[in-house]
Amino acid sequence: MPVGILAPPQKNIGYETSKHFRNLLRCVGFTEIVTPSLVGKRDIALSGTGKGVLTLKNPVSVDRSFFRISLIPDIINILSQNSKKHKNIKIFEIGKIYLDERHDNDYPVLERDVLCGAICSGIKYGKQDTEFYYGKGIIEFLFKESGIKKITYSKVSDDFIFDEDVSLEVSIGKNRAGIFGEIKKGFLEEFKLDYRVFVFNLDMDYIKDFISLKRSFVRPGRYPEIEQDISIIVDSGIEYASIEKYIKGFSGLIKNVKLADVYRGKQIKEGKISFLIRYDAMSPNRTLTMEEVNLLRDNLIRELNVRFGVTLRD
């Protein structure tokens, strides 16, 4: 009998990535669903594009004639079926989409692994409450726990499914990694849903190359940090991401910049938007005095006014 050492199997990166995100989402209360890869004309039409659709030559039924190009219609349909009896629904699916594109070795089908999730806590349209900030927190949690850095957000423009006012595209490095935000009311009406729905749709095949599960520890600062809030009003066409980027680079004493709240309404002029921005003022060498903290804040507001036309909200 031959004797030898068996080589260990190579890791399946796709499987490990899916397993990693499954565990994270289950930790924050999501339930996994599985939907068919074959869909009908209605789902294709609701996917927002007719390009790259693969048609089955001998379908079992009319409702299973095409390979899906998006997971979103099915996941919204599952929400619709369950929203009548349940509240605070959080579901996700990790599956493939299929596009009619030439790939390696002239293989006619491009398969992409996609992570799609949805949150519906029963907030009806017409209320100012939104699912966006809770959902954005889930996205940030996924990226943080995956060691993914160099993340940038940008406004969504002219999207068939997502509401441009409460949605963002997310990029890692220089390329688009996905989109998340609230679904348009008109789209939800196709499924007879009256509630606000937050959806995230991430390209797993792209994201997996940026995951790093190595852990490092940073020594906490010896000196206290002083939390500061600034409530500003700016033209609605200015992206928050550009303001946050400027604040982060304004001074080495400013740490942990984050968006705490957004307001549009009667208390500010039309065409304007209000951001409540929170940050910590901290020095690695000494305890800052309140005079220094206030001076830093005043200088920051002045420069924001010069660059972005920012004014303080009363």
Image (cartoon, grey):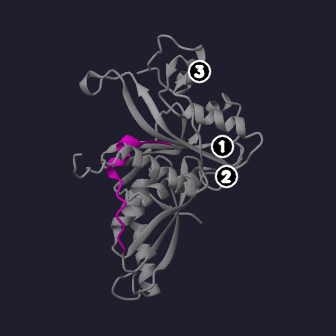
Q: Earlier in the sequence, mark 3 or mark 1?
A: 3
Relative to residue 183, is residue 283 depicted above or below? below
Q: Amino acid at mark 2?
A: Asp
Residue 29 vs residue 295: left or right?
right
Residue at the (46%, 37%) spot, across then down:
157
Q: Which mark is residue 129?
A: 2
SS state under label 1: loop
Query: Where is residue 70 shown, x and y percent of the image?
Result: 49, 31
Determine the CA span between mark 3 and mark 1: 22 Å
SS state under label 3: helix
Query: Where is residue 187 shown, x and y percent of the image?
Result: 61, 31
SS state under label 2: loop
Determine the CA span between mark 1 and mark 2: 9 Å
Give the mark toward the camera: 3 or 1. 3
| Residues under numbered marks 3 and 1 in contact, where contact means CB atoms less than 8 Å apart | no
Residue at the (38%, 52%) spot, across then down:
152
- Residue nearest the viewer, comparing 267 with 67: 67
Q: Which mark is residue 173?
A: none
* Pointer 1 local density, CA inside 10 Å: few below 14, some 14–19, many at least 20: many
- Residue nearest the viewer, comparing 207 with 267: 207
Q: Residue furthest top?
A: 58
Residue 296 vs residue 130: left or right?
left
- Residue nearest the viewer, comparing 245 with 8: 8
Residue at the (41%, 83%) spot, across then down:
292
Magenta stretch in the rendered image: 201-217
Give the mark toward the camera: 3 or 2. 3
> Is residue 147 a member of the stretch shown in magenta?
no
Residue to which mark 1 is pinned: 196
Residue to which mark 3 is pinned: 42
